[in-house]
Image: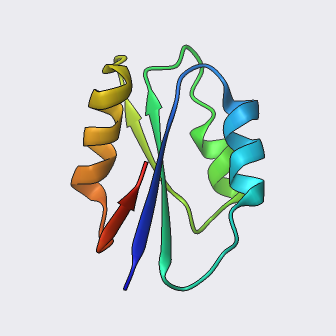
Amino acid sequence: MKVSVITVNFNQPGVTEELLATIPAIEDLEVIVVDNGSEKDASSQLQAKYPTVKFIRSEKNLGFAGGNNLGIKQAAGDYLFL
């Protein structure tokens, strides 16, 4: 069974990085970060540090539910952890 962890970032890349640092890199765990229209796109910096994480950028803020829905569409897990 695979679990997809989906988190939404909006203008707080430091908080997102703190979260990513606590998630272990295990085979059956997929991590997806949705940047929800942040003023500054920090995805490339985070991607370099966390290459196994999938980063999705939305050009506009879709809200919490909309950001999660964007991540869910890309998720491959049997279970979703939002």
Could you tell me how many numbered marks the image carries?
0
x and y, in percent, of residue 43 in the image: 58, 40
> On the picture, is 10 further left or further right than 15?
left
Q: Give the residue at x 27% y 29%.
A: 66
Q: Give the residue at x 67% y 47%.
A: 46
Q: Is residue 80 above or below residue 66?
A: below
Which residue occupies the foreground of this view, 79 or 47? 79
x and y, in percent, of residue 80 in the image: 36, 60
Residue 25: which quarter of the image? Answer: bottom right
> On the picture, is 2 further left or further right than 9?
left
Q: Give the residue at x 37% y 17%.
A: 61
> On the picture, is 4 further left or further right than 43?
left
> On the picture, is 48 further left or further right than 76?
right
Residue at the farthest left position: 73
Which residue occupies the foreground of this view, 15 or 55? 15
Q: Quadrant of the N terminus?
A: bottom left
